[in-house]
Image: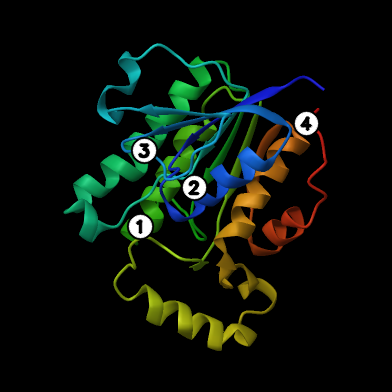
Amino acid sequence: MTARTAILAGATGLVGSLCLKQLLDDPTYSQVVAVSRRPPIETHPRLVQKIVDFDRLHQLAPIAADDAFCALGTTIKKAGSQEAFRKIDVGYSKAFAEFALAGGAQQLALVSSVGANPRSGNFYVRTRGELEEAVSAMAFRSIHIFQPSFLMGLRAEQRPGEGIGLALAQAFQFVFVDSLRKYRPILASTVAAAMIAAVKRAEPGRHIYLYDDMQALAKQPSSANPR
């Protein structure tokens, strides 16, 4: 099996940090490049850390990689405004995808949101939809888009109101059946595992993964090899 290189953006976030750990534990990847504005907490002999300014990412020489993983995200409160939020969630994610493609990446795994729709009246799901639309037009061989609802896991910073919303979602999880199952809360580690499993399947085209899809992918044997 040919050794592969993964490139990851968002390694200091909830899903991204778990994705980083799982990639480093996976023998499929001989090197994992973490592109971020600040160093990840993780250290590993196969980890290469690239501290970058995402506003100038297009000015950097491309980094050779086979598979790209994007888990960038913020909140409006942390960003300071809707404009700043869009710049990070859409602008930086799009810039990373273009950067990875320039380095030879054939696959992109992207963390989005359930209900993402570029024509939605909801600002958050609209921006996620705009991002999905942008990356879907790029020339990746495979694009894997993950649409979780509430994410369960330990964040470095607890988001306002998120704990209450998650507690309610878990308490009333029995309500999320049939077409509503996609709104069930999901472990961030499950999303990370599903991202890696989907990329290792390497099915060409554009794929959307909801709650049940992510749960099924995360249960696949980790020894699955990319095609």
Q: Quadrant of the C terminus?
A: top right
Mark 3 and mark 4 in contact? Answer it, CB < 8 Å: no
Question: Label 3, label 4: how many angstroms apart (C-alpha)?
Answer: 28 Å
Name the disc covering residue 12, or none.
none
Name the disc covering residue 39, or none.
3
Image location (x, y in percent) of residue 145: 58, 45
Question: Label 1, label 3: how many angstroms apart (C-alpha)?
Answer: 27 Å
Image location (x, y in percent) of residue 32: 56, 30
Location of residue 187 (image quadrant)? bottom right
218 with respect to 84 (left or right): right
Quick one: 50 or 77, which is closer to the camera?
A: 50
Image location (x, y in percent) of residue 117: 46, 53
Instruction: Check disc 4 and report the residue beneath it.
Output: 226
The three-letter code of the residue at mark 2 reads Gly
Residue at the far top: name it: 61
**204 versus 210 height, above or below:** above
Instruction: Check disc 2 and report the residue beneath it.
Output: 16
